[in-house]
Amino acid sequence: MREFAFDTAQEPFGQRHPDEPAPQLEARNLSFSAGGLQLLDKVDLKIQPGSRTLIVGPNGAGKSLLLRLLHGLLKPSAGEVRWQGNALDANGKRAQAMVFQRPVLLRRSVFANLKFALSVRGTRGTARQQKIERALASAGLGHLANRPARVLSGGEQQRLAVVRALACDPELLFLDEPTANLDPASTAAIEDLILEANGRGVTIVLVTHDQGQARRLGEELVFLQDGQVAEAGPARQVLDTPQSEPARAWHEGRIYLGPNTQPLRARQERAS
Amino acid sequence: MHSFWEAFAGSFGLVLALDPDLMEIIVLSMQVTLTAVFLACLIGLPLGAATALYRFPGRTLVSVTLNALMGLPPVVVGLFVYLLLSASGPLGPLRLLYTPTAMIIAQMIIVTPIVAALTRQVAEDLNREYAEQFASLGVGPIDRMVSILWDARYGLLTVALAGFGRAVAEVGAVIIVGGNINHVTRVMTTTIALETSKGNLQLALALGLVLLLIAFTVNACVMALRSTAARSAYA
């Protein structure tokens, strides 16, 4: 029932250049099931250092779940996540950071939110002070440093969440639909922060619903459908000349229901 | 009806005159209750937070026990502490029976489960929001507890208030372990009980008024603090 995928000529994602460097982050056969439902099914993924990978797909495709598995917040039911060639461990996790769709800010001031994250990562004294000031400046929140973080506007809160994650100097930053609830100006500010960090060498893995954002930010693109990789490759290629049916439907703005109905039909057949 | 208003007028007189006997009783009451609540928070806050945040064997049992102990009958606690502290009891040699310390112990035992059970609820709610972010940042177990307790501080103020309310109004346990000895272990609630039974309604009523006033003032302070906090979205 999964054959709807993509017997395309294209090779699996990440294996396009035979002599490319070892991936920074790799998912092998990654699966996750809960309550008898296979939510993520044998996902293979390679992410190169310094790249920008966008994960797109409809609601319930498993995008956020994939991000949490890659970040080690959840344990896969099968398969594994490898970080720089080894199994993802606590050190690997500390080299990553994540920004959530709804920013999780402590009930403290803007300044204290940054201070907390840096303290957790063991940064203290003047080094911490400098990083806080740099983070505040890059987010344009300097004048709000002493304000309670949770009275900021949605855009300001998300900017704070992004610079807080970046202040910890991650090698890789996960973002789970960071601009889903934001207006265009706030979205642009977040995207600028992301591109700037990427320019400094931070790998970006971002989940989005927004085709425009996928075009603006994407280098690599992974299209998820029903817990499987429907299509993956260079963002332009997947966006402009999609090979798989789900990606093509997305590209053309059609609503794609095909494989969603399949499990139901399969169940009915089994029942009869 | 006549004696009712007389008692009322007389009680106001006692309060306004800052009658020394009255003052002594009020001060001792506050000392005992505040110490007991402080100690109960010292134990109950981390205990409640730990139950909410950590997975350990017997966690559900601790949770259930704390909830059950919230409804602990004070007289039973009084009896239990009495047995512990009485001359033949295991803690008899400490000679604590009929001292304010005994009353603090009894109130602490009554209040700790309340503080712990309510803290668990508050910490659980906040942890639901923070857990993923903390896991992502790699916050250690101790830091997690400290941060949750600190960020829940205004909610926990209400928890401490609930404990205070229970302790300050408590009479059954402190009368058993304190003995209601004049100038030694006589507190507001035990005095009210005693003076009422003696027919000395003036003093009983005066103390009742003071008790009400204290409860009112403490609640007003906490509410004011919380509304400040809410304005900063800290609560």
Image (spheres, coloured by chain):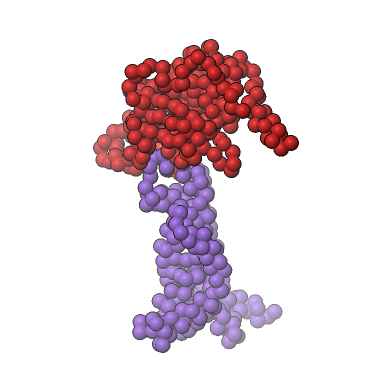
Name the residue at 53% across, 32% down: A41
A241 with respect to A272 (left or right): left
Name the residue at 71% across, 34% down: A268
x, y (%) of residue B94? 35, 82
A272 with respect to A68 (left or right): right
Q: In terms of depth relative to the viewer, which is nearer, A84 or A191?
A: A84
x, y (%) of residue A37? 59, 38
User: Compared with residue A147, is residue B93 higher up or lower down, i.e. above or below?
Assistant: below
Q: Residue furthest right?
A: A272
Name the residue at 53% across, 11% down: A241
Image colour for chain B is purple
Residue B125: tell me if it is visible: yes
Q: In terms of depth relative to the viewer, which is nearer, B66 or A13?
A: A13
Q: Quadrant of the N terminus of chain B?
A: bottom right
x, y (%) of residue A154? 51, 32
Q: Residue furthest top?
A: A241
Q: Quadrant of residue A248?
A: top right
Q: In terms of depth relative to the viewer, which is nearer, A269 or B68?
A: A269
Name the residue at 61% across, 75% down: B8
Image colour for chain A is red
